[in-house]
Image (cartoon, rainbow, N blue to C red):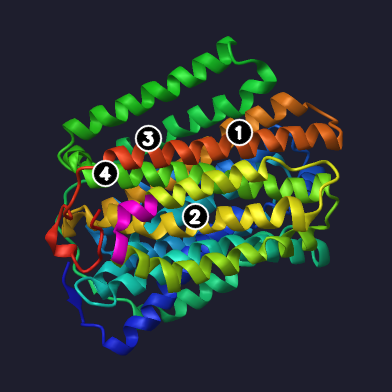
């Protein structure tokens, strides 16, 4: 897309601040509820099994609508969709913060997810417009990638501060002033693009993929309570699979699909999306259950639990910005993705050795730092590789696809591991039973990360050159 008017080099970096802030906020909104969950459960009446829907409602709407967000970004202009996403996110934050019932809370979180689904692919498209073809592109991707773990850690820390010293609704309201800051500077710092003549938007595709993913997650989350082989579980699971099949049929027949199926034949794109899927499943699940272990087993306050996870953030930011780009230039993206996922798997395996009477400095800190090192090595190379694999005209769709992989991996991974945890612990569990459940979750997340490493190594084994030379400024050689 042509840029009108051209953005000066000085404003590129302000634009990057806004784009990184977008990544920061959408990831913060996935993690900020972690330490507030016990208060939300107590005040609104969530059951232990349904509590994960405070997370999943956001992630399913986010992941399910990301392809639509990418398509809208390509069709109507990334900046317009970026602004619309922030407006919707503000509305969802107001609903979630003011919620007085389980249904209202879940609805607010879903609206937040819908807003984020418009923001993320538009932000990545804008990043490519600002830095594509320049020597600063790897640095821009590193800053953007580092904003994700910073947002995750800031969410946990802010969630602890706000929950303990103000009240849990403020974990949602805190998004609003940040959103207003971004909106104030968007017009001057981000490029305006010319709308493409693109025909109709594939609303049927958006509805079927979102409903299908939501049904699958719902079936897995509720299976421990009602039974895995019950008519309800199997029926909802089958319905979800059918809806996803219908989605792919629609994409194959549509003149303007959300996802051009030919794009999936790019082997580098598939491998990178698979890595992001497993990375989301392992990393986000670790954050969710580590928060619960710190509070419910070790007895940490909301503030202390948030502060306990800050060392991971420092390490991730350091590695992503200062170390990972250098390692990628020397060893290539494949080596970093595979080694990062492998290190993450070992860190999670170490974390599975937690004890009911554990000590933070022994049971949590070293293992979590090892896991953070692995995540920081794998995240940016897999993200950049996926976007690099698409033609420039489909950057928005590729951005939506890779973000979908990460978010749906998060939702499905957490749903499966939640089912495992509460299948072990049940209601009114003791500290020992909770520890056993969380240990199983960490081990399961480690297995997912290891599978991701093995599959990525196999899928990228014969890949040597980028799929599209137009993006060569971001090194993704294997």
In what element is the residue under mark 1?
A: helix
Q: For residue 409, say whether it is visible.
A: yes
Position of 154 relative to 451 (above/below): below
Q: For residue 65, say whether it is visible.
A: no
Which residue is depicted at the point 75% across and 46% down? 293
Q: Whole-percent x and y of residue 105?
A: 66, 46
In the rendered structure, find residue 460 and report the number of the disc placed on it: 4
Task: Tell us which disc is closer to us: 3 or 2.
Answer: 2
Q: Distance between the Cα atoms at labels 4 and 1?
A: 28 Å
Which residue is depicted at the point 12% across and 60% down? 469
In what element is the residue under mark 3?
A: helix
In the rendered structure, find residue 209 and report the number of the disc placed on it: 3
Which residue is depicted at the point 17% across and 60% down? 392
Q: Whole-percent x and y of residue 328?
A: 33, 63
In what element is the residue under mark 2?
A: helix
Q: Whole-percent x and y of residue 272?
A: 32, 47
Q: Are marks 2 and 4 in contact (CB under 8 Å)?
A: no
Q: Are marks 3 and 2 in contact (CB under 8 Å)?
A: no
Which residue is depicted at the point 83% across and 49% down? 298
Task: Tell us which disc is closer to us: 4 or 1.
Answer: 4
Please name whichever residue, 380 or 215, is drawn nearer the observer in this view of the structure.
Answer: 380
Magenta stretch?
330-337
Q: Which is more N-terminal, label 4 or label 2?
A: 2
Mark 2 = which residue? 375
């Amino acid at each position: 897309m042509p840029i009108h008017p051209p953005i000066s080099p000085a404003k590129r970096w302000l634009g990057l601040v806004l784009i990184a802030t977008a990544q920061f906020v959408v990831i913060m909104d996935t993690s900020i509820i972690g330490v507030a969950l016990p208060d939300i459960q107590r005040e609104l009446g969530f059951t232990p099994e349904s509590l994960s829907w405070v997370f999943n409602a956001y992630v399913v709407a986010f992941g399910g609508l990301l392809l639509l967000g990418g398509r809208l970004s390509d069709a109507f202009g990334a900046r317009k969709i970026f602004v619309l996403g922030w407006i919707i996110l503000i509305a969802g934050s107001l609903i979630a913060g003011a919620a007085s019932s389980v249904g209202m809370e879940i609805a607010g979180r879903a609206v937040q997810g819908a807003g984020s689904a418009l923001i993320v692919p538009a932000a990545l498209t804008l990043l490519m417009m600002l830095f594509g073809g320049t020597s600063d592109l790897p640095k821009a991707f590193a800053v953007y990638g580092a904003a994700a773990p910073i947002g995750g850690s800031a969410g946990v820390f802010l969630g602890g501060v706000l929950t303990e010293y103000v009240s849990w609704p403020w974990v949602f309201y805190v998004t609003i002033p940040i959103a207003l800051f971004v909106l104030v500077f968007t017009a001057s710092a981000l490029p305006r693009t010319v709308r493409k003549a693109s025909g109709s938007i594939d609303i049927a595709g958006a509805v079927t993929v979102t409903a299908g993913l939501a049904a699958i997650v719902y079936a897995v989350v509720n299976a421990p309570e009602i039974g895995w082989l019950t008519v309800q579980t199997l029926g909802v699971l089958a319905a979800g699979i059918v809806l996803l099949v219908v989605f792919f049929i629609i994409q194959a027949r549509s003149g303007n699909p959300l996802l051009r199926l030919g794009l999936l034949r790019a082997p580098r794109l598939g491998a990178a999306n698979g890595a992001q899927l497993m990375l989301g499943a392992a990393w986000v699940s670790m954050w969710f259950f580590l928060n619960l272990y710190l509070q419910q087993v070790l007895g940490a306050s909301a503030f202390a639990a948030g502060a306990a996870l800050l060392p991971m953030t420092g390490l991730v930011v350091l590695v992503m910005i200062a170390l990972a780009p250098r390692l990628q230039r020397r060893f290539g993206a494949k080596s970093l993705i595979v080694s990062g996922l492998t290190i993450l798997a070992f860190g999670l395996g170490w974390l599975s050795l937690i004890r009911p009477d554990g000590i933070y400095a022994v049971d949590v800190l070293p293992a979590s730092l090892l896991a953070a090192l692995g995540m920081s090595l794998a995240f940016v190379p897999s993200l950049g590789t996926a976007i690099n694999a698409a033609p420039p005209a489909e950057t928005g769709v590729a951005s939506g696809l890779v973000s979908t992989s990460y978010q749906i991996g998060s939702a499905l991974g957490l749903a499966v591991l939640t089912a495992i945890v509460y299948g072990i612990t049940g209601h009114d569990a003791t500290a020992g039973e909770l520890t056993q459940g969380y240990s199983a979750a960490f081990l399961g997340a480690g297995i997912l990360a290891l599978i991701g490493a093995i599959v990525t190594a196999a899928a990228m084994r014969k890949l040597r050159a980028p799929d599209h030379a137009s993006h060569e400024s971001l090194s993704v050689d294997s």
